[in-house]
Amino acid sequence: MRSWDYSYLLTELVLRDFKIRYRNMSLGIFWSLLNPLVMMGVLTFIFTRVFQATSIPNFHVFVLTGLVPYSFFALAWATATRALLDNPSLVKRVCLPRQVIPIATVLANGVHFLIQIGLLLSLALVAGYGVNRHWLWLPVVLGLELVFVCGLSLISSALDVYFRDVRYVVESVNMLLFWMVPIFYSFAVIPPAYHTVYQLNPIAAVILACRNVLLEAKAPPATLLAKLALVSLTALAAGFWIFGRLKRRFADYL
Amino acid sequence: MARVEFQQVSKTFTRHAGRRLAGQFLQDWFSRSGGERFHALREVSFALEQGQSLGVVGANGAGKSTLLSLVAGLTAPDAGEMTVSGRLVPLLELGSGFHPDLTGAENVRLNAAVLGFSRRRAAELFQPIVEFSGIGAFIDEPLRTYSSGMIMRLAFSTSIHADPEILLIDEVLAVGDQNFRAKCMERVLELKRRGTILMCVSHELDALERLCEQAIWLDGGRAARYGPAQEVLEAYRGHMFSNSQPPAAA
């Protein structure tokens, strides 16, 4: 019926999210840096001072490599799940391809993600990890994470319109993932029996790949990349399909 | 070629008293016929070709807004045939798609994107939109400081610049002052001359009579009357002044 300038539409929606969130805060964008820094500090304190149990060098960089992809995932998924209910007038009063609403929310979180990746890379450089050609894998891996979150959010945001419980499920899963994803422990300590499970979890895979690249200066294993790509693209396809099936009656339930 | 046609279109909602439990939802989803259903629209038919316009009147809750939502494709009908083709611009609620914390200018750009403007078109039309709205220097102030009349000016101005082939207006003009309303009216009539299909919900019958040559009077979701605007509005006026009690549901 109408052709959309999707890049313009998404840019405007992302800008809107971003401006609304920061306009009334005096610290503005620094919140994007403060949160991961505080978490990094606390975890580093606990595992190097309280437990004194780790032999991992530069534990703070190690933890941040886990925290940055994890917190993007958790925050983007949680806010995108509520996106349709947070913007009822975009669903009920204007004609637009409704898929863009949760996707724009994910992308708005992606802006913070970029800032945090900047922080991560700077801390890695300061700690003495040099730039290497495998850094080129980072956009691929983090891009796949973005694809995965978009897919998952399309599903959860559509379901949340009908069952408002979905957001609490998402929150619980996020809390669970904080422990189940190797943020403050390394893949090496996981018993081999569970390796496949971890590799199929895209967030764990993203973190492992980032550590390969940033801390070990080597390319992520091909099998890991293949599984990550497969799971992420499947999630996106499933997301569009399910959203398409469920969107017909959104307006009646908001 | 822009066109809007309804044939025996019905829209129902379930009555579930605000409950959103899983059981309720499943019942809804699987038994479209079962349960207590409320008919927001019942077998409504009409047809509009290029340049034609339809005024929609009726009491509160008669189904006027549901009718426009269906045309806009925001909600789906339960029965009947519906054809809507052409670039459609809905003006269904004051400031829908606007955000109070953004400035007028930011909201214009956002709204333009939502209405389907391309980036280039939006940049070209930004100045004309602001000029038509007459908001002036307030354009860089946050929308929450605007009066409802100012919000309407901005929304209306953006919408008519979207070059609509089908324009839906639900009551929003009511908050404008006389000058701006006259300006809007003129603009809408000009769009009509150029072939835009107009559907307009209003309680201001005189304005409807000027804008629309057809009208439909909805009563409890049914088309009580449909035909030339003058006749339908005359009947509706007569009904309103003759009995203050609403008629028993047909």
Image (cartoon, helix red, strand yellow):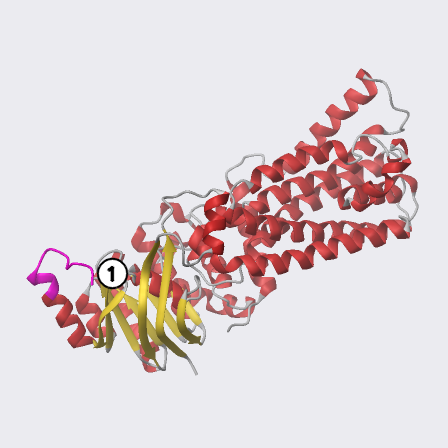
Q: Position of residue A136 (x, y in %)?
A: 85, 53
Amino acid type of the residue that numbered disc 1 sits on in the rendered structure: Gly
Is residue B226 placed above or below A72 in the rendered structure? Answer: below
**Residue nearest the viewer, comparing B173 with A1:** A1
Look at the image and tell me whether residue B106 can be seen: no
**Residue nearest the viewer, comparing A50 with B154:** A50
Magenta span of residues:
B239-250
Magenta-drawn stretch, dominant element (helix, strand or loop): loop
Q: Where is residue B232 in the image (x, y as percent from the top left)?
A: 18, 73
Q: Quadrant of residue A196?
A: top right
Is residue A7 placed above or below B84 in the rendered structure? Answer: above
Is residue B214 placed above or below B109 in the rendered structure? Answer: below
Residue that appears at 54% across and 42% down: A21
Residue that appears at 56% across and 60% down: A245
**Residue nearest the viewer, comparing A125 with B61:** B61
Q: Which chain carries label 1?
A: B
Q: Is residue B242 left or right of residue B31?
A: left
Q: Is residue A104 left or right of residue B210?
A: right
